[in-house]
Image: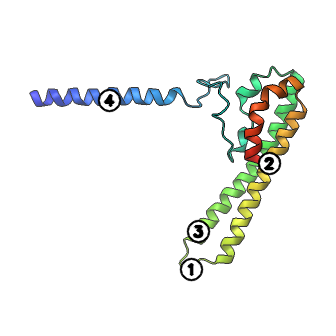
Amino acid sequence: MKKAAVMMIVMLLIMALAAVSFAQMGRGGSSRSMGGQSGGRSTEKQGIKPSLDLTNAIPDFTLIDLNLTRDQASKINSLRDALLNVVKVLQEETFKKQGDLKLILHENTPDQGKISTMQKEIKDLQDQMRLLTSQYLQEVRSNLTPEQRTMLRPYWTVWDSGYN
């Protein structure tokens, strides 16, 4: 009976620690509320890193902070929608080609010519996505006032380094 009580206490303690641990992990992440704003966002700009996730080239919280006019918001949203439509197709093609490349690599005697061709096609698709995103960012810049551009200046160097 005493062993069972001790085991029960130990199990409860482990579950409590796990619950606290999971709760802490959820605090600092990029979870978004229903309104689209970041839950625990930091005002530090260093945390933003460029990546090939081009579906969020400019984070929503950044645009919200700019106090865009309706015209600006409308134009930027249409630019984003156009980018997303094209990038979605390119990403699907990229994923398909990456799958095909894995199949080639797992063959008993993989053909080096096919591997090189597939790698080049994947790189070309990724380069095309980077170019489109860079053009999108330039279009966004051209639709902002000088004050708004100044507010985004810390982001441009990070984005430019990832997409050029």
Evaluate whether residue 32 shows in this view: yes
Find disc 1 in the rendering and name its residue. 109
Q: Tell me which numbered mark, 1 or 4, is placed earlier along the sequence.
A: 4
Circle 1 SS class: loop
Residue 91 in the image: x percent, y percent? 71, 52
Residue 3 in the image: x percent, y percent? 11, 31
Structural distance between the alpha carbons of marks 1 and 4: 50 Å
Find disc 3 in the rendering and name its residue. 103
Q: Amino acid at mark 3?
A: Leu
Up-down relation of residue 55 to residue 12 (above or below): below
Residue occupying image coordinates x 59% and y 77%: 110
Up-down relation of residue 106 to residue 88 (above or below): below
- Residue 142 occupies quadrant: top right
Residue 15: which disc? 4
Residue 157: which disc? none
Mark 3 and 4 residues: CB-CB less than 8 Å, in contact? Answer: no
Q: Tell me which numbered mark, 1 or 2, is placed earlier along the sequence.
A: 2
- Other residues around mark 2 within 10 Å, as few (<14) / some (14–19) / many (≥20): few
Q: Amino acid at mark 4?
A: Met
Q: Amino acid at mark 1?
A: Thr
Q: Amino acid at mark 2?
A: Val
Circle 4 SS class: helix
Structural distance between the alpha carbons of marks 3 and 4: 42 Å
Mark 1 and 3 residues: CB-CB less than 8 Å, in contact? Answer: no
